[in-house]
Image (tube, coloured by chain):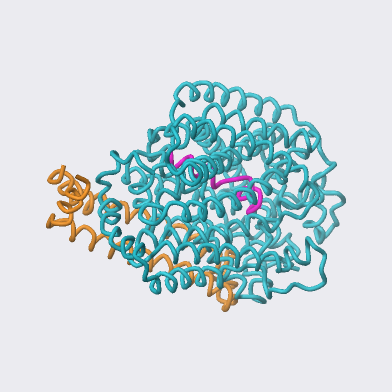
Chain colours: A orange, B cyan
């Protein structure tokens, strides 16, 4: 019984599409997150002077503090984008599969 | 001036020796805390009636919404350590406090993109359900339970000791009494109300914390005409580090490998923390799990931004109040060493400075509530590891009834509660600063690699996962024990054996490599079966089909 459901899902034309696209999207997002995060850590570890500079004439806030704040925003934005894509692209595919199989 | 021990700074909030003996009761704090207790007791009474089955007990019956779960996760994450600890670190060394916040926050993209949805589709009660989905029950459960219980014990000790000292200061209670109060409340919530009560305690506390933090940050910014840069300018002008406050600290640049290592453990540790992963089974579907992450990360990110304002605001404003110091010098040169209660009390003093004793009382009460809530979540995850993994699936080999498992989990809750109190008392005067860092390192080096590879790599076998997981666990633990934070600071040896305190940069790749190596060389019949079972696992993890009907494991 369980096997037939698995087989049905595997044969469904949209299943391969779902897995492929979702895997690609999550890998791309994960890579971007990793690049942003390790970029931040590597910069502060090996090039602290870059982060130490003030934003500009008359500013106290440094490049590092602003970057840190932007990095926090980037995490939330990436997650939101991923959820948006999931709702828009993956959920309809998934619903189609579930409808046909069950 | 920025003497800053990277590995321990955040965590050392739990080891401030200056905490004791300055306690004084704050009436509004006590009243507000009693109101909180009364409210949560009503919730527990309500939740107890809904807590009949193991599913109710471990996962609130899966009836929590994504938004509620996101708040509860934020509640788990915005512990006293992140609130007081990060604000305190910003107070001490400015920019460096931001590094920790970002490390903790970046655990969330990792959770979202690698595990959250698949975790929800594959498991029932805890993440061991997922690692044991196609691999052999006994070794995977033992591995998951060992790592989880160690992580939970380290976290519990750190929370109990930190909490005890904090409460001595905020409420003027005796240390032992404070620890017993926390342990007792935690046992009541979990024993009677299970996950339902624990979740609602977390939600209430998260809302209170977000409101309190927002108010505090707003009052600080108001003092600078809503101009954050004016606040920073004032902070730089009064702080002994001066403009360095805006730059990465000396310890970071003097040992970049340690910084990287810590960064890795923080970012990957979240996806291996048993009490956090368990929260994903309280929602009904992968879609709700996704919503949980988006809400959790938004609230956590927002709260960290508040914490920066609070930390820099404390630098700028506290020196105007010599009464918060034990003899502040005219040039503020000793503003870090003379703050009453230690630098982790910066946020607490700040609330008094900008909001008076009412805001102080409110924040003190919320902090107490925070600790109780976090400890309850830990106890629940511990009870699941004992009753669901070790008892039901290893000892009874899946033949126990739901009633028996429920009874064992309730007994485990009581045992964990008593143990937490005892450990809190035993470790009262010990240096527990390394414990949360070690917990994250173990989570990142044992649970995370096993979880990720078992759900996303066909080739992963029981042999590889078991050897790799235990090696990551052992390596990370030994490394920390032999490092400065334990070998020198706790055991009193002259020199550390490991070059820097954070193992992540070695232990995480080591675990991944070992799992890979012992999986690809595994030619057993079991390994063939496990690789074949990956197809069914993928179907289920991608679609969730078959999840509702899954009653085994």
Instruction: State the extent of the magenta-drawn residues as a range.
Output: B69-87
| Residue at the outermost right position | B327
Residue B383 percent across, percent down from the top left: 55, 40
Residue at the image point whose x is 20% and y is 52% from the top: A6
Q: Position of residue B488 (x, y in %)?
A: 78, 66
Instruction: Kindly identify the residue that appears in the image at 37 percent across and 67 percent down.
Output: B524
Q: Which quarter of the image is occupied by the C terminus of chain B?
A: top left
**Side of B405 relative to B488 (left or right):** left
Name the quadrant of the N terminus of chain B.
bottom right
Instruction: Determine whether B237 is above or below B366 in the image.
Output: below
**SS majority, magenta:** helix
Judged left or right of residue A67, residue B547 is left
Instruction: State the residue in front, B322 or A57.
Output: B322
Please determine whether, in this image, residue B55 is positioned above or below residue A78. above
Q: Is residue B544 magenta?
A: no
Q: Nearer the viewer, residue B528 or B62?
A: B528
Q: Relative to B111, is B282 above or below?
A: above
**Residue at (45, 55) in percent of width and height:** B108
| Residue B413 % position (x, y) | 59, 35
């Amino acid at each position: 019984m369980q096997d037939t459901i698995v087989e049905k899902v595997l044969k469904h034309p949209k299943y391969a599409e779902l897995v492929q696209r979702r895997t690609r999207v999550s890998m791309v997002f994960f890579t971007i997150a990793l690049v942003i995060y390790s970029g931040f850590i590597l910069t502060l570890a090996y090039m602290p002077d870059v982060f130490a500079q003030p934003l500009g004439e008359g500013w106290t806030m440094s490049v590092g503090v602003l970057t840190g704040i932007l990095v926090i925003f980037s995490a939330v934005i990436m997650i939101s984008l991923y959820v948006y894509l999931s709702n828009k692209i993956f959920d309809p595919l998934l619903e189609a599969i579930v409808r046909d199989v069950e | 001036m920025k003497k800053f021990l990277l590995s321990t700074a955040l965590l050392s909030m739990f080891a401030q020796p200056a905490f004791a003996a300055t306690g004084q009761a704050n009436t509004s704090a006590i009243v507000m805390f009693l109101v909180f207790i009364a409210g949560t007791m009503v919730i527990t009474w309500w939740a107890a009636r809904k807590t009949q089955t193991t599913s109710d007990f471990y996962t609130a019956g899966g009836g929590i919404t994504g938004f509620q779960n996101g708040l509860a996760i934020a509640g788990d994450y915005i512990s006293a350590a992140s609130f007081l600890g990060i604000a305190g670190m910003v107070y001490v060394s400015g920019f460096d406090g931001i590094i920790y916040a970002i490390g903790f926050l970046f655990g969330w993209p990792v959770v979202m993109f690698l595990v959250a949805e698949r975790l929800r589709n594959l498991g029932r009660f805890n993440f061991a359900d997922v690692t044991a989905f196609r691999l052999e029950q006994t070794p995977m459960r033992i591995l998951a339970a060992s790592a989880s219980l160690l992580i939970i014990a380290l976290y519990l000790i750190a929370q109990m000791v930190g909490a005890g000292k904090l409460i001595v200061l905020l409420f003027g209670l005796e240390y032992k009494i404070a620890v017993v109060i926390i342990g007792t409340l935690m046992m009541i919530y979990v024993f009677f109300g299970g996950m339902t009560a624990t979740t609602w305690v977390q939600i209430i506390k998260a809302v209170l914390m977000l409101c309190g933090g927002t108010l505090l940050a707003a009052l600080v910014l108001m003092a600078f005409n809503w101009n954050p840069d004016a606040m920073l300018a004032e902070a730089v002008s009064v702080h002994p580090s001066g403009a360095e406050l805006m730059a990465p600290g000396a310890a970071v640049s003097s040992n970049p490998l340690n910084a990287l290592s810590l960064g890795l453990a923080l970012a990957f540790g979240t996806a291996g923390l048993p009490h956090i992963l368990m929260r994903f089974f309280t929602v009904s579907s992968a879609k709700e799990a996704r919503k949980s992450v988006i809400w959790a990360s938004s609230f956590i990110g927002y709260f960290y931004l508040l914490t920066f304002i609070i930390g820099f605001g404390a630098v700028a404003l506290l020196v105007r109040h010599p009464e918060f110091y034990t003899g502040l010098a005219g040039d503020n040169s000793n503003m870090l060493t003379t703050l009453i209660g230690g630098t982790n009390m910066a946020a607490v003093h700040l609330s008094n400075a900008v909001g008076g004793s009412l805001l102080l009382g409110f924040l003190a009460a919320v902090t107490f509530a925070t600790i109780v809530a976090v400890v309850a979540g830990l106890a629940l995850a511990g009870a699941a590891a004992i009753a669901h993994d070790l008892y039901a699936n290893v000892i009874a080999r899946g033949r126990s009834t739901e009633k028996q498992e429920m009874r064992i989990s309730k007994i485990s809750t009581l045992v964990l509660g008593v143990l937490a109190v005892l450990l809190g008392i035993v470790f009262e005067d010990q240096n527990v600063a390394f414990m949360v860092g070690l917990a994250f390192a173990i989570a990142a080096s044992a649970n995370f690699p096993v979880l990720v590879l078992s759900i996303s790599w066909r080739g992963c076998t029981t042999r590889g996962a078991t050897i790799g997981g235990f090696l990551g666990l052992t390596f990370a633990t030994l490394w920390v024990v032999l490092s400065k934070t334990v070998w020198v600071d706790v055991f009193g040896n002259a020199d550390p054996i490991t070059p820097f305190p954070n193992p992540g940069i070695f232990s995480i790749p080591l675990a991944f490599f070992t799992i890979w190596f012992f999986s690809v060389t595994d030619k057993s019949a079991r390994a063939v079966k496990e690789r074949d079972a990956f197809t069914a696992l993928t179907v289920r993890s991608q679609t969730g089909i078959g999840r509702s009907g899954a009653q085994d494991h």
